[in-house]
Image: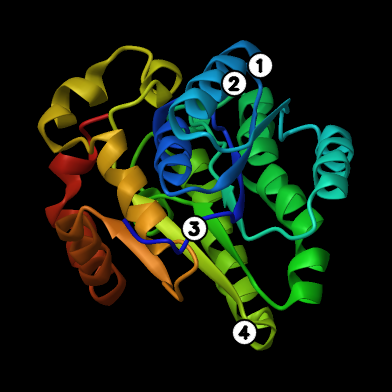
Amino acid sequence: MSDRLKNKNIIITGASGGIGAEMAALCAQSGANLVLLARNLEKLNALKADLENRFHVQVDVHKLDVSNTDDVKAVFSQVLAKLDHVDVLVNNAGFGIFREAHEAKIDEIKGMFDVNVVGLMACTSMVLPKMRLQKSGHIINIASQAGKIATPKSSVYSATKHAVLGYTNSLRMELARSNVYVTAVNPGPIETDFFTIADEKGTYVKNVQKFMLKPAYVAKKVVDAMLTPTREINLPRWMNAGSIVYALFPRLFERIGRRAFDQK
């Protein structure tokens, strides 16, 4: 195993389960010290105990709802005061709800943007001064293939992920001279609790079950790219090929792909 992450300080939001917890375990196995953030402090404490016991690294946990920007500022200020350097921030917290646009509730719309977009930006803004000063670091934003190909019943979720990709691409150019890497991760559907909220009826999960990515697989791809100048991680590859075709021939792609898009 590479020593690239040994003794590095890595912050992960949405770390209490799914790919967040999987990434935390892989980072700890590589010798990194962790700051894990999520709304469920009980799960975070259990993860902390497990990782410290198995890998003998330092794990700091904090309860954080990234949609509350005052809490983001308070928690990150506390975290950063303890760290002489920040090497990686993984903006992993996020959620979606699949509904047609005319059925989307305003509270749900605001909630998705508050977590997926504003929360991600707020967390990033807290680490940027330190990374710029130290002239090193890596910001990894978990976006989605939905940010490249919008589909029916995901208009709001896709909009949030389009926003994340726009922000990520601009940030990468801004930080190029500071030696800070910026990576967008665009996975397709992952086998996690995400769909408990997103897909209440279970229809989408049933239709795409055989294509779903395993959390451990996605996590390994992300951790393997940490502190490397990786622009994007697109999973699975065949789905990303579809986004390229879509960019070139959108009308044809939408017509041919209509049946697949309606699987939600």
Check the picture and name the quadrant holding the C terminus. top left
Whether residues under marks 2 and 1 lie with C-beta atoms below 8 angstroms apart, the answer is yes
Q: CA distance from mark 3 to mark 2?
A: 21 Å
Of 51 and 128, nearer the camera is 51
Q: Disc 1 designates what residue? A: 41
Whole-number angstrom distance, CA of label 2 to CA of label 4: 34 Å
Left or right of 212 in this view: 152: right
Question: Which badge, 3 or 2, is on the more N-terminal residue?
Answer: 3
Earlier sequence position, callout 2 versus callout 4: 2
Q: Which mark sits nearer the N-terminus, 4 or 1?
A: 1
- The amino acid sitting under disc 4 is Ala
Q: Quote the CA–CA distance across marks 3 and 4.
A: 21 Å
Of the pair 161 and 92, the residue shown nearer to us:
92
Please identify, in this view, whether the residue under mark 2 or under mark 4 is nearer the observer: 2
Q: Report which residue position mark 2 lands on.
A: 44
The residue depicted at 71 percent of the width and 35 percent of the height is 66
User: Spatial distance from mark 4 to mark 1, Cα to Cα?
Assistant: 35 Å
Q: CA distance from mark 2 to mark 1?
A: 5 Å
The residue at 32%/48% (across/down) is 220
Would residue 85 appear left or right of 219 to someone viewing this image? right
Please say if the residues under marks 3 and 2 sit with CB atoms less than 8 Å apart: no
Residue 5 image label: 3
Residue on which disc 4 sits: 176
Q: Residues within 10 Å of mark 3 (few under 14, many from 20)?
A: many
- Give x and y (percent) for residue 109: 62, 33
SS class of the residue under badge 1?
helix
Question: What amino acid is found at the position of numbered circle 2 in the picture?
Answer: Leu
Mark 2, Cα crowd under 10 Å, few <14 / some 14-19 / many 20+, is many
Give the mark toward the camera: 3 or 1: 3
